[in-house]
Image (spheres, rainbow, N blue to C red):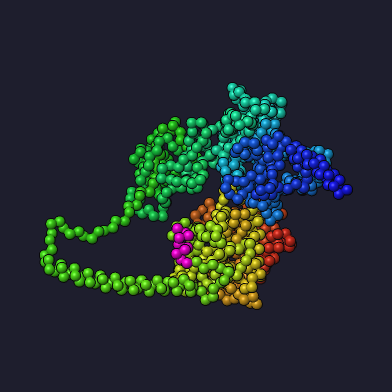
């Protein structure tokens, strides 16, 4: 009987297995299915033929993954769909077909990054079809959502681009943030390829292409759809049923049955139709069938970055180069911005000294047409050069047709054009002469010593003296080595912290290649990148070298070691060890791959709203731990973007406890004799010679939160006039009071689409910067309000005694 049951179970399993496999092969994905980024056992959701895959694709060698759809059978796994606002995502992120909420993407902590919402409909299954379209279906087999309606930079055969849709280029071949170019329909029905201003992501007036098919007197004679049909042809449909071909008639079409096709707006601004053989017998690469427009534009943001020059290669596509004397800001981004190798400015030029500082490189047929600030008419070459040389604002002068145009940095829309018949005088700083080491005066040729006996006597005395000095030096050396060994085994700290590793100074010097690669610096030390063997594993570390050897620094060192050594929280930077050898004070931290928050806040385009809110919540949680959950309460005293580091998952890590004031847990206040912190982030009570408490960190966090929301600095110069400053805290209150949060975030569409959270975060920020510290919430209350757990009341004006509007 038992044997019969086993046989029945075995045959039952064999019966079920083909159905399960068939379901997977048919591209059907049941509701409740989940994929996890980086999980080796997880396979992507494939189309029936296996041509397309939906899931997570690893981004080069990084521990990041692109949530995307791609061609699965070709070697380079070309991506054809992704979501700009969330990619790439860290390992451990998940995508789930949720029956109630639709297709949901979450980070490793469960925070929702993106969703394809199905509204009130019940999601039954997903379907990855052989055209590259991922579809969400309801109970009656109706289509609730499809990826074809939300393209990124590519459309495929059988896909349409409609008036409400657009194609947006990515930043570069490997950077999947939004780039500079957009293909869409204007309201009048013209298909246009335009540049986008960064970071506002708003259309420039610059058009690289315009179909010019609309008729202002006939509404039906306008375009409304780009169709990429099953034969591989592309055309614009008009409302009167006419079509305008985009695919050149002269181009023979490789059969779709034998080739993959795609049309992509590339990061250089060229809209290109590619094809690729389905089998391995043909060309293994994508081949260009046709493209448009392939120009170096005079307007808009252009294919190249600032201070760069655009030129057309032999294949008609734009390429970029830095002018002589300039180098790429990012060596890995050849389409990015350039910077001068040496400084060019007004700070150091005195009367008559320009000739000693600068010279010119002459280039033909190059211009930056949008950067003129002065014109000299008439002029000659000599006058043009001299005018630029004597003007500290002038970086380049263009001479053409007996006219001279002076241009200042940054230079934009640089291009090579042989029709210009112009000369560009590019100002470069002269190479500074190396310091000359003066040799001892040589003995004149032919001269002889006057007294040979005197020479012998002096030589003997010098020989004996040298021997005695050698003996004394050797003794001193042995003594120093002995003392050094004692120091190495008896560090200066009063009590060893057993959880931390002690490093010898020589070990850290070798790990950092003699402190070669600098990561950053502060008022008490410089941070260097290094590599150490920790637990038999090569580990990248950040080594902070304190460089002021006075009593204050020694106190700083001990406070930081003793404080951080006892902390353990995911939103704090972890201290791995330290060095306290002789006069050397060094701290060894875990390395944060994404650098400081200060750098991220200045990204162009802006870092996604979801990542920024995640960072703000993480900082708040870290401060709650420091204020309330440590055995010894810690006040940081210097919360600012430079002291917030970001790990590989963009988790916020609070660093630099060098300014921390330590309070016993039963003390609520402490008196300080001097102001601690950084200008712009310092709470008002620091200036009143009164007692301070943890509310000083709340104030600093409030300023930082407003920076994270708006991606602005806390103090900025304005374009209104000389000396005008924009104070971020003032702007936040004005915009909130007047209901103009769109102005505060500079029309950040992602933030404005999440208006409830945006308003909540701004109100929390205003509560934190209250002039009266008793009105500020605790960091625990701040954390609860940010996460939507506690109610946020409408805040009062943070400056009750202000007399300004």
Q: Position of residue 253 (x, y in %)?
A: 62, 25
- In the picture, the quarter occupied by the C terminus is bottom right
Q: Tell which residue pokes out farthest to the right in this image.
A: 1
Q: Is residue 257 above or below residue 332?
A: above
Residue located at (61% from left, 55% from top): 650
User: Would residue 511 be counted in the magenta stretch?
Assistant: yes
Query: Can residue 505 be seen here?
Result: yes
The reply, left or right, for residue 545 in relation to residue 777 is: left
Place residue 636 in its image quadrant. Answer: bottom right
Nearest the viewer among 581 and 402 is 581
Nearest the viewer among 676 and 546 is 546
Query: Can residue 137 be seen here?
Result: no
The reply, left or right, for residue 276 in relation to residue 36 is: left
The reply, left or right, for residue 291 in relation to residue 525 is: right
Residue located at (60% from left, 44% from top): 176
| Numbered range of the magenta stretch | 504-513
The reply, left or right, for residue 407 in relation to residue 639 is: left
The secondary structure that dominates the magenta segment is helix
């Amino acid at each position: 009987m038992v044997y019969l049951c086993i046989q029945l179970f075995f045959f039952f399993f064999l019966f079920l297995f083909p159905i399960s496999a068939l379901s997977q092969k048919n591209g059907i994905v049941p509701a409740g299915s989940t994929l996890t980024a980086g999980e080796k056992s997880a396979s992507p959701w494939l189309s029936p033929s296996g041509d397309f895959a939906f899931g997570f694709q690893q981004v080069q060698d990084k521990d990041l993954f692109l949530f995307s759809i791609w061609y699965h059978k070709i070697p380079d796994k070309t991506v054809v769909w992704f979501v700009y606002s969330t990619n790439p995502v860290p390992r451990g992120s998940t995508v789930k077909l949720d029956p109630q909420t639709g297709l949901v993407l979450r980070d490793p902590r469960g925070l929702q990054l993106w969703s394809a919402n199905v509204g009130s409909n019940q999601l039954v299954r997903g379907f990855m079809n052989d055209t590259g379209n991922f579809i969400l279906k309801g109970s009656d087999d109706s289509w609730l959502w499809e990826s074809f309606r939300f393209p990124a930079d590519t459309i495929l055969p059988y896909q349409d681009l409609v008036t409400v849709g657009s194609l947006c280029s990515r930043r570069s071949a490997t950077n999947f943030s939004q780039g500079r170019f957009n293909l869409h329909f204007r309201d009048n029905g013209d298909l246009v390829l335009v540049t986008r201003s960064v970071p506002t992501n708003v259309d420039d007036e610059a058009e690289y292409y315009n179909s010019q098919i609309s008729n202002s007197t006939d509404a039906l004679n306008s375009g409304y759809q780009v169709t990429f049909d099953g034969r591989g042809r592309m055309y614009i449909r008009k409302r009167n049923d006419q079509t305008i071909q985009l695919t050149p008639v002269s181009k023979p079409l490789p059969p779709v049955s034998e080739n993959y096709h795609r049309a992509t707006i590339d990061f250089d601004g060229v809209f290109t139709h590619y094809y690729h053989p389905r089998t391995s017998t043909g060309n293994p690469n994508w081949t260009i069938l046709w493209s448009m427009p392939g120009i170096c534009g005079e307007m808009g943001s252009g294919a190249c970055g600032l201070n760069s020059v655009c030129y057309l290669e032999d294949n008609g596509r734009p390429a970029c180069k830095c002018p002589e004397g300039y180098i790429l800001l990012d060596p890995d981004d050849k389409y990015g911005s350039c910077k001068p190798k040496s400084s060019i400015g007004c700070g150091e030029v005195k009367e008559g000294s320009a000739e000693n500082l600068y010279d010119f490189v002459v280039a033909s047929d190059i211009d930056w047409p949008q950067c003129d600030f002065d014109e000299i008419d008439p002029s000659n070459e000599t006058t043009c050069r001299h005018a630029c040389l004597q003007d500290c604002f002038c970086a380049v002068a263009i001479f053409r047709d007996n006219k001279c145009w002076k241009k200042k940095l940054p230079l934009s829309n640089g291009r090579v054009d042989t029709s210009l018949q112009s000369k560009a005088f590019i100002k470069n700083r002269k190479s500074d002469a190396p310091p000359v080491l003066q040799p001892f005066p040589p003995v004149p040729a032919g001269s002889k010593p006057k007294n040979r006996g005197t020479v012998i006597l002096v030589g003997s005395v010098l020989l004996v003296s040298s021997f005695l000095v050698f003996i004394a030096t050797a003794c001193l050396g042995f003594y120093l080595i002995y003392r050094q060994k004692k120091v190495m085994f008896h560090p200066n700290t009063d009590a060893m912290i057993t959880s931390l590793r002690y490093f010898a100074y020589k070990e850290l010097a070798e790990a950092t290649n003699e402190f070669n690669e600098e990561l950053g610096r502060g008022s008490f030390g410089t941070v260097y990148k290094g590599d150490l063997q920790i637990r038999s594993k090569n580990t990248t570390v950040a080594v902070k070298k304190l460089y002021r050897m006075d009593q204050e620094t020694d106190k700083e060192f001990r406070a930081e070691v003793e404080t951080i050594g006892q902390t353990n929280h995911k939103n704090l930077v972890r201290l791995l060890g330290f060095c306290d050898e002789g006069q050397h004070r060094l701290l060894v931290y875990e390395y944060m791959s994404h650098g400081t928050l200060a750098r991220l806040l200045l990204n162009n385009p802006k870092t996604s709203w979801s990542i920024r809110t995640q960072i703000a919540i993480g900082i708040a949680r870290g401060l709650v731990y420091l204020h309330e959950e440590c055995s010894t309460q810690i006040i940081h005293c210097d919360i600012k973007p430079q002291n917030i580091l970001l790990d590989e998952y963009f988790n916020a890590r609070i660093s630099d406890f060098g300014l921390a004031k330590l309070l016993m847990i039963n003390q609520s206040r402490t008196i300080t004799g001097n102001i601690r912190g950084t200008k712009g982030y310092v709470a008002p009570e620091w200036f009143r010679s009164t007692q301070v408490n943890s509310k000083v960190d709340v104030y600093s966090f409030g300023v930082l939160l407003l920076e994270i929301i708006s991606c602005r600095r806390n103090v900025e110069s304005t374009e209104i006039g000389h000396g005008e400053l924009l104070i971020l805290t003032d702007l936040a209150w004005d915009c909130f009071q007047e209901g103009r949060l769109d102005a505060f975030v500079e029309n950040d569409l992602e933030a404005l689409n999440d208006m409830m959270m945006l308003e909540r975060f701004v109100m929390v920020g205003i509560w934190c910067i209250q002039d009266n510290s008793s009105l500020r919430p605790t960091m625990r209350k701040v954390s609860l309000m940010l996460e939507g757990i506690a109610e946020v009341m409408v805040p009062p004006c943070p400056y009750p005694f202000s007399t300004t509007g």
